[in-house]
Image: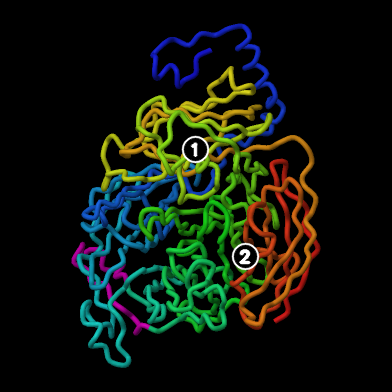
Amino acid sequence: MPSTAQRLIRHRPRLRTIRSILLVAGLLGAGAVAASTSISGRTWANPVDLDYRYNYEQMNQGISYRTGADPAVVRYHDAWYLFLTLADGYWRSTDLVHWQFVKPDRWPFDGPVAPATLVADDKLFLMQAAMEPRPLLYSTDPAQGRWQFWTRLLPPVPGAVWSGHESAMKPGDLPPGPWDPGLFQDRDGKVYLYWDSSNVFPLYGAQIDLASDHADQGEGKRVAFITKPVALLKADPAMHGWERFGQDHDDPTIAPYVEGAWMNRHGNRYYLQYGAPGTEYNVYATGVYVGDHPLGPFHYAPYNPVGYKPGGFVVGAGHGSTFQDAYGNYWNTGTAWIGLNWKFERRIDLFPAGFHADGQMWVDTRFGDFPQRMPDHRLREGESTFTGWMLLSYRKTAQASSSTAGHPAADATDENPRTFWLATANTPGQTLTLDLGGPRTVRAVQINYADFESGRYGDAPDIVTRFVLEGSLDGKHWIRVADRSHDTSDHANAYVELEQPTRLRYLRYVHVHVGAKNLAIADLRVFGNADGPPPPAPVLVSARRLPDARDAEIVWKAVPGAVGYNVRWGLSADRLHECYQRFADQPTRLKLSSLNKGVRYVVAVEAFDERGVSVLSRTATLDP
């Protein structure tokens, strides 16, 4: 039975034999029972599957890459709208799983960076990051991409120097802005602006008047500052380990950045969120200060960072937004770091979030780059969105139809987005085949493309992603498990949930088209389950605070057959919201460098393999 790859190369019709048909029946039948409880069509895996845009900023250096960062998500009428840095448009979704790009009719010429969004007076507002007064846009029909000027020119920030005059700043002056803005409307209708991105200056806030009662003045209405800007928070890395710069917080020579303000009100508390210490490393995280008024005073939350994902395939969770779905569940978006072609090459991620009854905010990044389900109901306290579909492809044998020196097929199974398989030619019929090591029940596949000398610096009609996925139990007889050969959009991180669970040993990617110059795949990730019980709990050997109380060392014993471990910690045994994922071929000794001085923690470790997740190890206490 010829494969899709053979058909693409030889253009011969597919022949079906009785043996092939019987094998196909066996492949699909194995998943028939599980399919009755399928959550088909409502799962996703980070990075979020979007048609990320090619950046133009390094085009004159010949550096080509797709990117997306600083996600702001708001609900307007019956849909959610997602705005990113330098996208020249935005995305719309009615289910938070499938996103459609919208090309607007009016947009800032240079493309907005870290845009602020606000829904007020039945209008959707958009403010770009700026170092001087710029327009404020609004829409009452964002689904069709129709935008108008709310005002042609926002007012200057009171007390701020003009861009280019920072060297002349005097005590009491503010830096140019508002950069990295955030907008918030309280229940009384008052509107607040938060802003800045700096490793020198704090985050600022002020009340503004949107001039909603002057709508009859059209785009000539004057927005105004009601209050003088006030400093709200600043990084304190001497006390907060996670605010230290660098990979795993290892660079004390650079002061940390605070940026990306986002405000939520929950009950009578105000949660001012921010990103730190820097977007170009694995530890980019979300912190939160809590207060009783939109302009503070605010108090540092001892459970910070609230959103943190330093380990795994997807790393980074800072500078995003927190919003609710149709059922009242909270979600938090963040910025994930790729950094292959440029230090600011990024993606976005989405995590479940919420608030405990005592007001503690949380973001769940555990298994945050494994498939998650989008709920169709209000989640119960402690209910997880993790599907339980495990990673089946880590370090598995991979074979390719062709490979370029230095970029073998094995790089597509190492869970590292900065290494990749590179085919010798970007031609239809190229294949990448994984041997899962035995029969597995496969549920989903994620194809993470890499940009290697892609030669693209903006959108174009031929920038689309097309492929076919095939599966086999014996490596000889193949069935098609997914067909994306006619897609009309790009997918840098294509996520495919199979129509039904399928028993496979081999999974084959068959190439059709990508818009880049080269065919490069960072990781071909396969999810599902092997047969058998989950692994036993690891033995926690020791957990101790180091002389620098911002650090701790966690040691555990290896579990035979484990794929990896999650080191989990938090303020109590029932609130282990922080998670650092490690793979089994890494040391079973982890230095945690994200702790807050003066805070007591509880820590435990769990193991996972292709069958499932262990129970937690014993817990240990990290005293201040």
x%, y% of residue 293?
50, 79
Task: Give me the C-alpha separation between circle 2 and circle 1.
Answer: 43 Å
> What is the residue that sits farthest to the bottom in this orientation?
171
Dot 2: within a 10 Å radius of its alpha carbon, few (fewer than 14), some, or many (20 or more) residues? some
Q: Quick check: is 473 in the magenta stretch?
A: no
Secondary structure under badge 1? helix
**The C terminus lies in quadrant:** bottom right
480, above or below 149, in the image: above
Dot 1: within a 10 Å radius of its alpha carbon, few (fewer than 14), some, or many (20 or more) residues? many
| Image quadrant assignment for residue 208 | bottom left
Q: Would residue 180 be found to the left or right of residue 35 on screen?
A: left
> What is the residue that sits farthest to the top in this orientation?
18
x%, y% of residue 596?
61, 78
x%, y% of residue 423?
40, 35
Q: Which residue is mark 2?
A: 355
Amino acid type at mark 1: Ala
The range drawn in magenta is 210-229
Front tag of 2 and 1: 1
Question: Which residue is found at the position 36% from the left and 45% from the top?
Answer: 452
Observer-nearest of 170 and 561: 561
| Res 296 seen here | yes
92, above or below 221, in the image: above
Question: Which residue is found at the position 54% from the left and 48% from the top?
Answer: 415
Q: Quick check: is 228 in the magenta stretch?
A: yes
| Res 187 seen here | no
Observer-nearest of 505 and 76: 505
Question: Which residue is found at the position 70% from the left and 45% from the top?
Answer: 609
- The reply to whether callout 2 and callout 1 are in contact (CB within 8 Å) is no
| Image quadrant assignment for residue 392 | top right
Q: Which residue is mark 1?
A: 409
Question: Which residue is found at the position 26% from the left and 68% from the top?
Answer: 214
